[in-house]
Image (cartoon, rainbow, N blue to C red):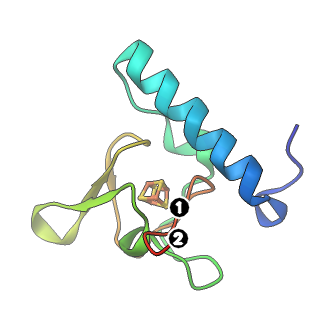
Amino acid sequence: MFTTASHISRRQCLTLVCMATTHSVLANTKADKRDFHYQDGPKDGKSCASCRMFSLSTGGVGVCAIVDGDVSPKGWCMAYSSRST
Ligand code: SF4
């Protein structure tokens, strides 16, 4: 279905976000970071800090509406969705 994280289209990304959101709602859980290729650094200038799924929590870390656990504001995953679009 998908090629690589670097070649993901906007449509594929939206599909992933919908799938993850549906999964989270139905199972009342968040997705595993590995399923979305989460990394602690930015990718192509994109990072969690500018993603609409990110909320800053305490201690310089944040939480994500999709993936489980603490996420770095400098992190990134393939479900990235810009706040500005
Ligand atoms: S880039 Fe991924 S891990 Fe980071 S806030 Fe967005 S959806 Fe969550």
Q: Residue furthest top?
A: 26
Q: Mark 1 packing: few (<14 Cα in 10 Å), some, or many (20+)?
A: many
**Residue at numbered disc 1:** 81
Does the beta carbon at disc 1 come under 8 Å from ligand 1? Answer: yes
Image location (x, y in percent) of residue 20: 53, 33
- Report which quarter residue 66 is drawn in: top left
Depth check: 27 or 70 in front? 27
Question: Left or right: 41 with respect to 73?
Answer: right
Mark 1 near mark 2, Cβ–Cβ under 8 Å? yes
Q: Amino acid at mark 1?
A: Ser
Image location (x, y in percent) of residue 72: 35, 67
Front tag of 1 and 2: 2
Q: Residue at x 34, y 72 (%)?
A: 73
Q: In terms of secondary structure, where does tag 1 sit?
A: loop
Instruction: Say which mark, if any, is on residue 85.
Output: 2
Q: In terms of secondary structure, where does tag 2 sit?
A: loop
Q: Residue at x 53, y 61 (%)?
A: 81
Depth check: 85 or 54 in front? 85
